[in-house]
Structure formats: C-alpha cells, structure tokens
Image (spheres, rainbow, N blue to C red):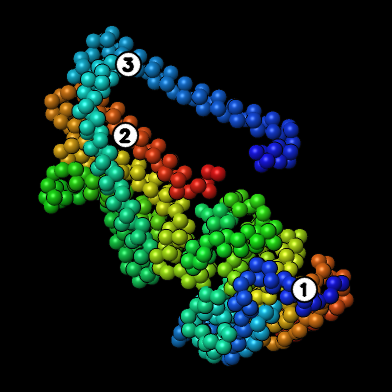
Amino acid sequence: MPMNASPDVDAALSGSSIAGQAASIGASIQAKGLTKVYGSGQDAFHALGPIDLDIKPGEFVSLIGPSGCGKSTTLLLVSGLQPHSGGTVEVDGQKLTKPISEVGIVFQDHLLLDFRTAMKNVMLQQEIRGLDKQTMRERADMLFDRLGLKGAENRYPAQLSGGMRQRVSIARALVHNPSMLLMDEPFGALDAITRTQIRHDLEMLWLETRKTVLFITHSIEEAVGLSDRVLVMSKSPGTIVEEIRIDLPRPRPAHLGEYPEFAKYAQRIYEIFAKLGVYKF
Amino acid sequence: MSDSTSSTIQTMPGAANRSSGKLSALRNSAVGSILIAVFSVAVLLGLWEAFAIYYKVPAWLVPKPSDFLARLVTDADKIFYHALATSRTLLNGFALAILIAVPLALLITSVGALRRGLYPVIVFLNIMPKTVIGPILIIWFGIGPMVAALIVFLMCFFPILVDAMSGFGAIDKRLLYISRSMGANRWQTFWKIELPDAMPHIFSGMKIGIVKAIEGVIIAEFIASNSGLGFMIMQASGFMDMTLMFAGLIAAALVALVFNGGMSIVERILMPWKTT
C-alpha cells in the first residue's frame, strides 16, 4: 500500500496552479453546542444536536449516520446557509452570521444548470463572484483535466453521464479556490464502479489542494476510504456519538475490503450502528 | 472533424447505415408530406372552383378561390397594412403579458402569503371569459388597437403566469443554496439561475399563450379596434364584400403561421440544450 504523501511532495504540488495562489489554505471549523430546531411551539422539530465540531485546516472529516439524523443540516449550519438555533459556529475563528462564500458545495444531485454547458456551469462561479475570467478559465481547465472531463467542456449536462455530471459539479465547487469543501452524499446517486473511481479522484485532488472537507455520507466504505476522521452520528435529533481517527496511508486503494486495517475500522462503525439500533440483525 | 471520425468508429457499420437510411427516409417523408399537403389543398380549391362555376354560386354568397386569392394580390397593400396592425397588436399584448407575468410569478412563488392570497384570484380571473372586458375597456380607453392589445394581453397572461409559477416553484432549493454560497445577489439569482431554470415551464406557458393570443386578437379587433385584420373583415362584412372577408381569413391564417414559426425559433434560442 502506498505511504502517506510526504511533506516535500505536498510542497511540490502546492506550487502547481490547482493548489492556487498562496492565500487558500484550508479553513478551520469550530462548533460548540450547535443545535437546529425547525419551526416553533407545537410544531417545533428538533433536527440536530447539540454537537461539537473541531475541524483543523486541511482536514478531511466525514459525518456518517442514519437517514434524517441531521447530517445535511450540519452542513447548512456550518456554511451559514441556515441559521443555527443554539450554540456557536466559527470558521477560521470568525463567528458565522451570514452565508460564507469561501466555500464550495456539492450535493447528492449534481444541480447543474441544464441551459449551460459543463464549462459554463463551472464558470458561473466566476460570473457571479466577478473574478478574473482568464485565471478562472485556467483553473477550470486544470480541474477538467484532473477530473477526467477533458472534451466535455461544451456539452450540456443532459449529454453527460451521471458520474461526469458529478465531476463537473465538483469542479464548480473548487474553481474559485475556496478554503472549504462541503459535500452532502456526493456519490450517493452513482453506481459502484463510478463511485470507487470518483472517490479516488477526489482523494488525489484533495491531497494536492488540502482543502478542509466536510463529507457527509451513508457509506462506511466512503467514510473510511476518504477521511482523516469519521464522526458517527446517532438517530434524530443527531448527536455525535463517536469519533474515529482513520490511520491508513494515502492514497487509499480501490478494493478497501481486502485490507484487514480497513475491515477493522468498518467493523467498529457497524458495531456502533448496531448499538444505536440503526442496524437490527 | 475528429469528433465525427471517432463516433463512426464507435458505432457499428450496420448502425451507421441504418441511421443514415432513417435520415434520408425522414427527408423524403418531410418533402413528401409537404408535397401531399400542397397537392391536396390544390385539389380542394380546384373542386371548390369547379363547383362554384358549375352551379353558378354568386360571389357574395360563396366566393370562388380564384376571386379571393386574386383579392390577396389586388388589395395587397390594404391587407398587408391590416395584417401588420394585427401583428403589432398581437406582439404588444403578448410581450406585455410576458413582461408582467414572469416577474409576478417569481414574486408570488417567493412570498408564501402572496401565493396563498392571490391564487384564488388568479384562478377566478383565469376562468373568466376575457372578451367580456372588451366593452369596459372601450369605455376606459376608446376604440383602438390599444384595447385589442389589452384583450390579447388578458388572454395570454394567465397561461404564462400559471406555468411560470410552476417553473419557479420547481427550482431545487439546494440550487439556491449554491447560488447563495457564491454570493449571488437577487438580480443575479433571478437572471442567471431562476429565469433560465424555469424557462421550459415559462415557454410552455408562452406556447399556450400565443395560441390564445392569435385567437383573441381577431375577436378583439372585431369588437374594439379600428385597424387590423379583424377590423378589416368586420368592415368588409358591412359592405357584403365576401371575397375580401375570405382574403382576410387567409391573411389571418398566415399571421398565425408566422407567429407559430417564430415561437419555434425563439425556443431554439432560449433553450439551446434541448435541440443539440
């Protein structure tokens, strides 16, 4: 199995334009006693928490838990897209009061715009943010190259496969060089083969760029296959019941199941789910 | 160039033959169906002509095709003037409907209270026959193309409004999250995301709208205008000028044809991903 990317490989890669111009290292995310309650009074629905998060710059953290446990809500709170009901969230030490823009988001559905070609979908970031067109185009070209999208620039989403669309969606989330990448079950709608490949491609891209990633998933294999840390959540209202540090070398192999170290981590998560009553065997 | 070679390599030779065969069959059938249409219309008009001559039907009762087709040429200036007036009225009413219905639909869908409050009103106005407003509008604005345009507006406003509302309502909330994370302001969100995303819905509303508008414009000109094909036909009716009425009818059909064709062109421009 390959070893951890060494520091000088890191340094060499961060010099490439994908890692971007100086400023963009990963953001840190801190949350304390974070809760979300939808509605009020009789209809109030306690969706999440309280949870604490402490995500270091450049860390890859997965949230795993049963459906409806508040994983997606966590993502919306951390990005400031939904106001939290209690507790605090800080990104890079700044308390969140409004949506942060130093972020790229990928959802389960690609959410590309039908009426824009793949490249124009990615360049929407440039148009709306008013960034320099040429620099952004160069970054987009680079991302298309890394994500295996060469030749798909002028195709409309309807002309792309599900995996390709999701790759375009990842390029859109990264083109403006954000410090944080939020992914909500990004591979959930893909077939197993595509999923394994795109997982690997994402890992390689992350090794180059070291964005902070908060990755939400149902899949134990994805969580263990990608993360530095996995946070396991309970059923609704979700709280974090266990934190598992994944000490496996990177890049991680495709057929994880054959490695006993991997199986050990997966087993631990299964056991936690069984204890929580997520699985009943 | 390289694209086409790679695609022929990928597809099997049999498949390529079959698809090109299909293409030529399509071309044949398109040309064929036009020929058949032209031929059958010619036969129909010929029979009409023959019967009218044989039974000596007077022109003031049922004019011969040769009579009213000739009027299209001899009265070309007059007919063209009125056809242009009709087109202008139609376009004004239709454009006004789009300009008001689309933003209003966005407003209604984004404000929950408005949606609940206005929906019954919209449904009521939608089912109300629009031409009944004609006499009221005449009192307010006097007889003229403006009143006809307003009636056209009313006829196509509601289909566009209702479809635009369902279009804006169908936008995925998470897409708006993405646009907010980009820091998009209200205008950018509308112009770059919501409007094009709702466009297929809006366009199907426009398609229904244009049909209603074409129907409505002639009726509106019957009752409330002093120019346009509807007015010309009404005037010809006053003089028992049957051949001009038939010529007007054909001109109205041609105007409808032009607008329908225009819509397909607009569709291609607004929604390029549907055709490529």
Residue A132 or residue A187, whichever sits in front: A132
Tell me the kind of residue under disc 3: Trp
Amino acid on which the number 2 mark rests in the picture: Val
Quadrant position of residue A20: bottom right
Same chain for labels 3 and 2? Say yes or no: yes
The quadrant holding residue A30 is: bottom right
Question: Do the residues bearing badges 3 and 2 touch, measured as CB atoms within 8 Å?
Answer: no
Residue B196 percent coordinates (x, y): 45, 56
Q: Residue at x 73, y 41 (%)?
A: B10
Q: Residue at x 37, y 70 (%)?
A: B111
Same chain for marks 1 and 3?
A: no
Residue marked by disc 1: A9
Which chain is disc 3 placed on?
A: B
The amino acid type of the residue labelled 1 equals: Val
Q: Secondary structure at mark 3?
A: helix
Work out whether residue A270 can be spotted. Answer: no
On the image, which quarter does residue B112 sit in? bottom left
Residue B255 numbered mark, or none = 2
